[in-house]
Image (cartoon, helix red, strand yellow):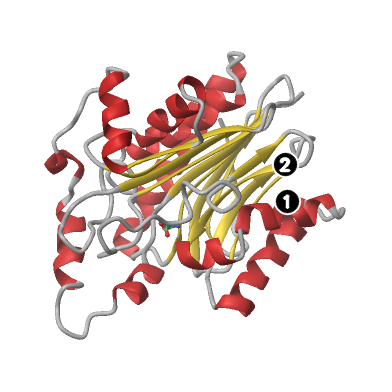
Amino acid sequence: MLPVVVVHGGAGFIPRDRAEISCAGVREAARGSYAVLKSGGSAVDAVVEAVTMLENNPAYNAGKGSVLNVKGGVEMDALVMDGRTLDSGAVSAVRGVANPTQLARMVMEKTSHLCLTAEGALNFARAMGVPEVPEESLITDYARMRWKKNLEPGANPVESQMGKMGTVGAVAVDVEGNLACATSTGGIINKMEGRVGDTPCIGCGGYADNQIGAVSPTGHGEAIMKVTLSRLVLFHMEQGKSPKEASDLALDYMKERVKGLGGVVVVDPKGTWTARFSSLQMAWAAAQQEQLHYGLYHGEDFTEPI
Ligand code: ASP
C-alpha cells in the first residue's frame, strides 16, 4: 500500500500577510507526517503527528494560536478516529493543554468513552501526566487583537470567523492500508463559553472507516453539524462517488441547505485523495509517492519533491 497523508489549515479567507506562513505550515506538517508513515507508523500516528505540528504552530486556530471565546479564554476541541476499529476519542472545551489531539488519542486508547469535556477532560489530562500549560502561552497577539475587535459594538463575529478560520486536520492511509483522521480547533471567534463545535463530534468533525474513507473538515461548526459533513462525504463515497465528487456534493449541500462554507480533506482505502473547499481559500498539503502537493486557492495543485 502506498501511504498518503493530506492536511488542512482551515477554510476561509487567509489575509495576504498570513498566506505564506499558512502554506508553509501545512507543507511542513504533511512532510513530518509522511515521514511517520514511511517509517512504518500507523495512520493514527501520522494524523496525530500532523495535527500536533499544526497545534504547535501559532499560525493556526488550534493549540497555540487558538481564537478566544467571548471572555477572552481558550477552549479547544479535538477528535481522533481509527478507521480500522471505528474507535475514536475526543475532547471538547478543554483548557490548559498544548495538544488537545494527543489528549483525544488518550481518550480513545485509555478510556471506555468517546468524548471528555471541559474540567473533566483537564482532570483526565492531569491523571495521564499531561503537563498543564498556562492559558497565556496559547494566546497570540493576533488572537487577542481579533477578540478585541469583535467585542466592539456592531462587530459580527460569525462573519469575521467565516473570513478567517484556521482549524487544522489530517487524514492518512498507512502502509497496511489502515485509515485515520484527526481534527483540532480553538473553535469560532468570540464564541460563548462552553460552546462545542463540530470538531469533537464524530461524523461531523471527522470520520474514518477502513471500508469507505477518512475525512477531516473545516468551516462553520454549526453548519457542519447540521449536515454531519464528514459522514455525508462518506455516504456519497459509499454510493460510488470518488472522494472529489463526494466532497463537492457534500459541500454544495451544506452551502445550499444551511448557507455554510467550509472544506474537507479526504482519502479512500486505495489512497485516492482530495482537498476541496467552498470557501475562498483553504491551505492544504498532501504527501504521496515522494511528491508533495499543496495549494491555497481553487484550482491550485503545486508539486515539489518531498
Ligand atoms: N469548525 C470549527 C468550529 O466551528 C471552525 C473551523 O473550522 O475553523 O469550531
Q: Which sits earlier in the primary sequence, circle 2 or circle 1?
A: 2
Q: Is residue 52 above or below residue 285?
A: above
Q: Is residue 89 above or below residue 238?
A: above
Callout 1: SS: helix
**Residue 304 can be seen in this image:** no
x then y, percent, for residue 182:
51, 38
Query: Looking at the rendering, which quadrant does residue 239 occupy?
Result: bottom right
Label 1 beta carbon within 8 A of ligand 1: no
Nearest to the observer: residue 180 or residue 117: 117
For residue 302, side relative to residue 62 (left or right): right
Q: What residue did someone put label 2 on?
A: 213
Q: Residues within 10 Å of mark 2 (few under 14, many from 20)?
A: many
Label 2 beta carbon within 8 A of ligand 1: no
x then y, percent, for residue 101:
41, 34
- Marks 2,1: beta carbons within 8 A: yes
Residue at image location 65% in from the left, 39% down from the top: 208
Q: What residue did someone put label 1 on?
A: 234
Q: Amino acid at mark 2?
A: Gly
